[in-house]
Image (cartoon, rainbow, N blue to C red):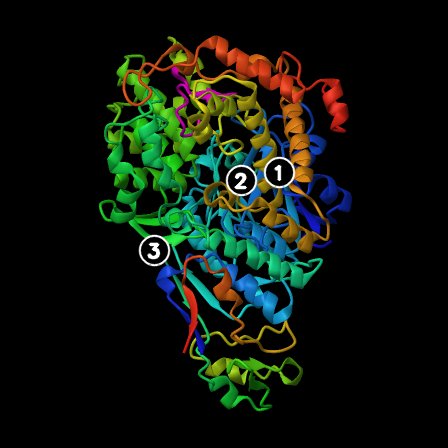
Amino acid sequence: MRLYVDSAKCSGCRACLVACSLNLFNESNPKKAALNLIGHFPAPGVYEMKVCTQCGNCAAVCPTECIKLNERGAYYVDFAECTLCEACVAECPEDVMYVRVELADAAWKCDLCGDCVQVCGTGALWIAD
Amino acid sequence: MNGYGGSILRVNLTDNKLTKEPTPPELARDFIGGRGFGIYHLLREVPRGADPLGPENKLIISSGPLSGMLSAGGGKCDWTTKSPLTNGYASASMGGHFTAEMKYAGIDTIILEGISPTPVYLLIDDNKLQLLDASFLWGKGAIDAEVALKNKHGEEFQIAAIGPGGENLVPYACVNHDFGRQAGRGGVGTVMGQKKLKAIVIRGTKSVPVADAQAYRKAGIDLYRACIEAEGHDEWTRYGTTIVTSWCDEVGALPTRNFSAGSFEDGKNIYGPVMRKEIVITDKGCFGCPCPCGKYSRSRRYGTYVEGPEYETIGLMGSNLGIGDIEAVAEANRLADDLGLDSISAGNTIAWAMECYEKGMLTQEDTDGLDLRFGNIEAAFAAIKKIAYREGKLGQLLAQGVKRAAEQIGKGSDKFAIHVKGMEQSAYATHNATAMLLAYMTCDVGAHHNRSWAITYDLQVGRDKVVPEKVARIIWLQNFRPMFDVLGSCRLQWVELGIDRDLYVPLLEAVTGIHRTWEDLEAVGDRIWNLTRMYWVRENPGFGRSWDLPSPRFYEEAPKTGATAGQITNYEDVQCLLDMYYEQRGWDDNGIPTPQTLQKLNIAVQTH
């Protein structure tokens, strides 16, 4: 299972980002979310949303093996073991592996909680195999 | 403080002094946020009789406890000032993503004071606060300015900018944000222009504290699911506010040729489905919105992009100008946005000029050679540009707003200047629609629809009825609907999707830790409504009943065509509406809140 996105349906509202931060960190903060929204305005007037495909590249390069599989079969970061080395960030093909030391003491990524899908009003996000 | 950024940012543009102070807990308790904060600061800090374009006036930007949160449509902030258009209370609601950045930068309210000696922009990057030189931006369109600032500071920053209309002090200049959202009405962009503040650039990366994170998550998701699963969600989201265009045309509420009628013979060419098919390229949502009304459009003919047009602009710059061409309306919308003009006031004022021209009250000498007939698209575009730059005789005339322009021209043109209190009426023709007429007459900023949108209610209960129940409905809407502007969350989820408003109660409690029912919130709304009324009283000697009258067009002159042909509200009924309204509000015969009413609401305002 993984998260999918159809960027053509995304309206750029960022509800998914708030829901994501709330589930990942128990905090309200869209800057601490694991989806990557880029707006291209005024032209050509489209949103581009990138999400984690659970490819596992991050886990493969993690020197401390702190990126592990959860019960949903998704890779997640064990915050306590992360050393902020950023090796995973460079390997992520979708730019959704995050290290921002000013915001959190560990790297973060999508753990497939599904809350973003719950709040997406345009059907741009869904979970499937 | 749970649910709040926690601070007020004061920016003194005269002295280049930026200071922060904590948001007082008692202010949050009594006024909650948004336009509650706005009127509080306006009444306390802007001295009585201040020149709206003088250094004493302030521009107050406030978020609310649901702004930026997991609240369906939590993208709203309020811009309050003393209006250069009306000399009264101005409060413009802006969607988009600006307010979320305020909250996450730890700021509830930005208070802009004084006047900068040179053009500047304000940079807020969490705790980093700076006024920076904006000479490279001055003169640029609002859209170009936003592009330049995004390129300079980065995609994560949100921008609010004025265009040439604000720089040139057109009294109905707006503030633009996110390539198509505005703080539109009452001249908030004018005040920003007078302060020589071209733009605000903001990013916030801090978490907003909440009282109970798990309850917040649950209540937030419940609210989103209710919106997404609502029966009307998909159709509303497909068309946004343009969903009402065809209905308004059918019932005679679509302003046509300067509100001389409410149905437009070319209306079908500007309906929502035509727009969706011809020009819309994507839905564009404000922060956290599960049913985005924003439609982003591309015009092949003009080679341009614009967010919109919304229903209001379709009404005022389409049918009201006799233009039945959605692509032309979109281009007029883009011009107004980029030049920084409120498209409602601009469209309304140009329609008045077109009527003057067709009646011979304005000649080509007055219009700088423009053939300013209804339906002339190029003349409409030219008029918009002239207004923004105050260019030529026409630009100078129309850049005053419709009330002052009619006073200048005379010749009885004030009879068809469609405004209340000097604010141009928005896009509901109110011939024989007494609830909506009363809503415009008594709206606290002038003839604006968003406080009390009652046109559908007129149709439900009988549009000509003048009964206490109708008046009570208007008062309830005026107390209730603006509370969304206090909370910082959009009202359209309730209005258009019909979701249960009680879904907001546990959400607000989880965020702030304070339990408030809608009855509690409406009591705050009632208090704010009376405070804004007292602001008008304080600022305008002689303020009273006559200020609440609508344009004579709605009681002297029945439309000749369309669904409301031959229908009129007589003057006695207009006065009767006011009698009942004042009585139910606890105001005297002149429309002034009585001492008993003020005492009951715990309001003390010095008016003498």
Residue, disc 1: B35
Counting every numbered tag in the picture gives: 3
**Circle 1: element type:** helix
The kind of residue tagged 2 is Ser
The kind of residue tagged 1 is Arg
Q: Crowding at label 1, few (<14), some or many (≥20) Cα neighbours within 10 Å? A: many
Rendered location of residue B336, percent (x, y):
38, 37
Rendered location of residue B4, percent (x, y):
68, 52
Counting residues from the N terminus, which is met first, the one under dot 2 or under dot 1?
Answer: 1
Rendered location of residue B145, percent (x, y):
44, 49
Tags 2 and 1 in contact by the CB under 8 Å rule?
yes
Q: Nearer the viewer, residue B134 or B177?
A: B177
Residue B608 visible at all = no
Residue, disc 2: B93
The residues tagged by marks 1 and 3 sit, at their Cα atoms, a distance apart of: 33 Å
Rendered location of residue A98, percent (x, y):
54, 75
**Circle 3: element type:** loop
The kind of residue tagged 3 is Ala
Residue found 45% across the figure and 77% down from its top: A2
- Confirm whether the magenta stretch covers residue B277: no
Q: Chain of mark 1?
A: B
Q: Residue furthest front?
A: B461
Find the magenta span and give its range: B416-432
Q: Crowding at label 3, few (<14), some or many (≥20) Cα neighbours within 10 Å? A: few
Same-chain check, marks 2 and 1: yes
Q: Nearer the viewer, residue B65 or B406?
A: B65
Tags 1 and 3 in contact by the CB under 8 Å rule?
no
Q: Quadrant of residue B568?
A: top left
Residue found 66% across the figure and 26% down from its top: B530
Q: Which mark is residue A43?
A: 3
Horizontal relation, residue B565 to residue B84: left or right: left
